[in-house]
Amino acid sequence: MNELIKNLIKDGPVLTDGSWGSQMLKRGLKGREAPDSWNLTHPDAVEEVARGYVDAGSRIILTNTFGSNRYVLGKFDLADKVVEINTKGVEISKRAAQGKAYVFASMGPSGKMLVTKDVSRDDLKQAFEEQANAIAMAGADAIVVETMMDLNEALIAAEAAKQTGLPVIACLVFDSGKQKDRTMMGNTAEQAVDEFTKIGIDGIGANCGQGIEGFIPICAQMSAATDLPIWMKPNAGLPDMVAGEVIYNTTAQEFVRFVPDLVKVGASFIGGCCGTDQDFIRAIGKTLEGL
């Protein structure tokens, strides 16, 4: 096991952070803007999000680089800004961390589909390597490949991240199938564990897709299949659309009722995804302290 990961989890589950996108929307991000472009145009607002999680007790914070690959940025005519945006994203989170938290840089999907030949494996590999190398050069402590719906794309991204020498955690979205425990492509948690283990991943997990209750069986399936650390970041339930606005109705206190169960089935890292904020992180932290 990677030494950084090993040291982090040696005393029990580690508190990570919450949603970034919804926090930036509250600060004025518009739908037509690339969230990651705010690393260049609104760095203070991005740092405010990151610092809020540090102040709430997060021992790991992510970066505003989820869509900082050439394909996503290309939709906003920013494909030539990959290195600059990733570099600034890591620098902002490191500044906010103030040595109190580790910075695990975020890498999300390309928005392209391998199965429909929107993109070749080689081109995807080059795009993720470009992003991962920029992240590593900027001084991130680790990389989290997250919100991946296609296991094959996730493997390409994780291998690209691994070649930097940084520890890498890979997360998929499990929200399909009768039990809501498969990816969009039909992969199970056990299949994901098997494939990621082959490439020497440092941790595996799930994020987004559904609320915390649904993460408990997914975490249990992963835990039964591997000794790798398990990263869990559920949504604050499923959203409703109210007057054109996305609203998550699960409260922090409702969310943390299930944290002990998540720990019981093997979660090593716990935070939140869509709809969660600093209040959720504080509540999770208090719950973990009480276990």
Image: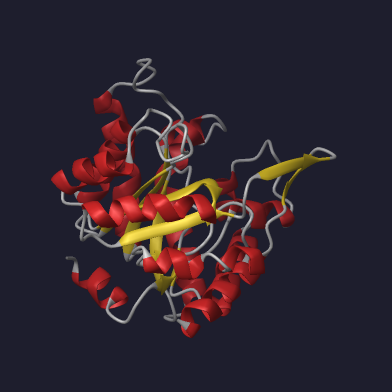
**Is residue 149 shown left or right of residue 273?**
left
Q: Is residue 176 above or below residue 198?
A: above
Q: Is residue 38 visible?
A: yes
Which residue occupies the foreground of this view, 1 or 209? 209
Q: Is residue 2 above or below residue 42?
A: below
Q: Position of residue 249 (x, y in %)?
A: 72, 54
Q: Is residue 41 above or below residue 56?
A: above
Q: Position of residue 109 (x, y in %)?
A: 42, 37
Which residue occupies the foreground of this view, 136 or 273? 273
Q: Residue at x 35, y 15 (%)?
A: 117
Quarter of the picture containing the N terminus is bottom left
Q: Position of residue 93 (x, y in %)?
A: 48, 66
Q: Is residue 238 above or below residue 101?
A: above
Instruction: State how the image is colored.
Output: secondary structure
Q: Residue at x 26, y 37 (%)?
A: 156
> Image quadrant of residue 77?
top right
**Is residue 178 shown left or right of residue 197?**
right
